[in-house]
Structures are given as structure tokens and as C-alpha cells.
Amino acid sequence: MAKVLVIEDEEGMRDILKTYLEKNNFDAFFAEDGNTGIDMFKNNSFDIVLLDVMLPDMSGWNVLKTIRESSKIPVMMITARSEEYDRLLGFELGADDYVVKPFSPREVVARIKAILSRSKWAESDNLISFSGITIDTDSRVVKVDGKKIDLTPKEFDLLSLLAQNMGKALSREKCLNVVWGYEFFGDLRTVDTHIKQLREKLGDKRDIIKTVWGYGYKLGGD
């Protein structure tokens, strides 16, 4: 039984999530504020965290930063804010997913199941090298001209997927289904956001990621 930590200050939302999580055989634990959530996280073992951005004592972003200092556990942000800046910030800090209120609790459960069961294709022991870029999918390290660059888990998975399909155009839907592991319910711009961040981090190598207009992206080629 997978253990889920929900950090959410709205009692009604906690009750709804509790009902659906337990109905789907998850072992759910709840914290009403950021500090309590951090303490629970540090003193217990969980499989995934559902984290509200707007908490009474601290920002959910700060909670996420604390979690990422010691763990790569999947974190799904839950928020009423849908602006691009918020999505960018969440992904930059290492969030694995982002759902905006109001949402279907069935959708949240489906996303959790997919995150926990997605393929481990990105964790093989392959070493992929091209154009001065090296991807070690075993240690999950990316180097550009020998210098390590820091990527979020989803940025790494997306770059690895493109590299494993060098020269092949991949649709946004394909990227979502493989990297995020579920039939995406929301905005396809999630992929665009991650591609933008990848290009920035690749620096002089940014043009290696090609846009296939009206379709998706590919690595290398014309």
C-alpha cells in the first residue's frame, strides 16, 4: 500500500482527498501546514507528496525546497493559481506534477497512480553522448562539454527521451505520456515549459533541441 503525504490547509479538501485516496487503497497521511508537513516527511517514509502552494505558515515552494534538499520523492503541487510563472517556478524547484483547483479528485488519483507506476526506462545504465552532451541515465547526470548541469527530474527524463529518439520528432502528447506517465488532463504547454528550461540550461547547446512546429520536438537533425 503506497503511502501518500498530503500537505493541505483546507479541511474540506483534505476530507475529499482522504475519501478518494483510501477508496483507491492508498495509505493517506495529512498535515495542515508546512512545518507539520516537513516534520512528518522527515520522520516517516512516504511514496509521494501532495503539496498545496498556499499554506498558512509558509509557502509551499519553501516546503518543496526543503524536501528537495534530501529527497527526490515525487511531489505534486496543488494550487488555485494557474499562471505560467507559478508553473515555471514549481517545475524549476523540482515538482513532478501540477494540478490546479478546482480539480477532479479522480484525476488526482489517476495522476498519482501513474507517477508511482511509470516505467523506469530513464534509469537504465546507458550512457548517451552527442554534440558535447553526455547523459548518464544510471546516475542521472548530464554534462555539457564536461561540465555538469543541474536538471529537475522531469527535465532529465524529457531530455533522455529525446536523446533516445535522436532525430525523431516526438509529439507533445507522446512526451507527456512517456515522461509524466498518464493521459494528460490539462495544458500541453507543460512540455513547452520544460523545453524552454532545458534550452536555457544547455546554454550554447540549446539549438540541439529543434521545434517541430504544430507537433512537438526532436533532438538533432535539421
Image: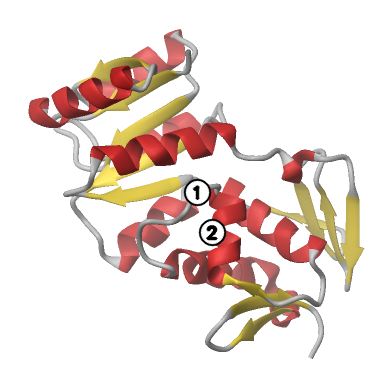
- Judging depth in this view, the residue of 63 and 44 nearest the camera is 44
Q: Give percent across and percent down for residue 138.
A: 82, 39
Q: Give percent across and percent down for residue 8.
A: 21, 30
- Judging depth in this view, the residue of 183 and 123 nearest the camera is 183
Kind of residue indicated by mark 1: Tyr
Q: Give percent across and percent down for residue 33.
A: 21, 25
| Residue 150 can be seen, yes or no | no
Kind of residue indicated by mark 2: Leu
| Mark 2–mark 1 CB contact (< 8 Å) | yes
Q: Is residue 212 above or below residue 201?
A: below
Of helix, strand and loop, which one carries label 1?
A: loop
Q: Which mark identifies residue 149?
A: none
Could you tell me how many numbered marks the image carries?
2
Whole-Å distance between the Cαs marked 2 and 1? 7 Å
Specify the quadrant that holds the C terminus.
Answer: bottom right
Q: Which mark identifies residue 176?
A: 2
Residue at 90% over, 50% down: 127
Name the image quarter holding residue 105.
top left
Q: Give percent across and percent down for residue 30.
A: 26, 18
Q: Give the residue at mark 1.
A: 182
Of helix, strand and loop, which one carries label 2?
A: helix
